[in-house]
Image (tube, rainbow, N blue to C red):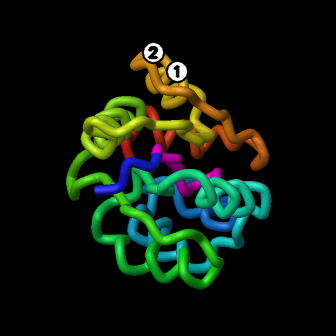
Amino acid sequence: MSDRPLAVFDIDGVLADVRHRLRFVERKPKDWDAFFDAAVDDPPLAKGVALAVASAQDCEVVYVTGRPERCRQDTLAWFARHGLPEGRLSMRRGRDFRPARVAKLELLRRLAGDRTVAVVVDDDEQVCDAYEAAGFRVLRARWMSEEPVLQQAQEEEGRT
């Protein structure tokens, strides 16, 4: 096990621009399968990718996401395609629809264990608040414009 501190990154809205696939969850009924299947086509968010790459110089980069476990292989391929550092990927278990602030904090705590977490980078204000309340240092990623439908998906429907 490395003794390097962890730099923890969210994916959607931090590294990946999800705006092109919000159409799948703006309608009723929401098409969650199509929403997650379209993630392979997410454009990278340059500022987030550059921050992850720079963080890898001093930290072990790891990822905590509300994406469901079934998206693992596509997500790892997306990381490789866009030059993101290799790192552990913690994902939401299937059928886990708890609010992101609850599910992701649990994933982070499990991942951190007895390791020092240098920073956690996330775009969801409620998730950031939960991380800070738990004592983690947070960088709020505000480089993708806020999308109300994404906020609803994360917090009310426990989907990302």
Q: Count the marks: how many?
A: 2
Q: What residue is rendered at 53% in x and 37% in y?
A: 118
Q: Inspect this view and state whether residue 103 appears.
A: no
Quick one: quadrant of the N terminus?
A: bottom left
Three-letter code for the amino acid on which mark 2 is drawn: Ala
Residue closest to the eye, 55 or 4: 4
Q: Which residue is mark 1?
A: 129
Q: Secondary structure at mark 2?
A: helix
Q: Residue 11 lies in magenta, yes or no?
A: yes
Q: In the rendered structure, which segment of residues is drawn in magenta?
A: 5-14
The outermost residue toward the front is 3
Q: Quadrant of residue 81?
A: bottom right
The picture places residue 32, in percent across and down from the top left corner, at 41, 62
Residue under label 2: 133
Task: Specify the amino acid type for callout 1.
Answer: Asp
Above or below: residue 81 compared with residue 146: below
* Image coords of residue 101 (percent x, y): 41, 31
Q: Is residue 72 left or right of residue 48?
A: left
Q: Callout 2 environment at 10 Å: few (<14), some (14 to 19), or many (20+)?
A: few
Instruction: Name the main secondary structure of what is drawn in magenta.
Output: loop
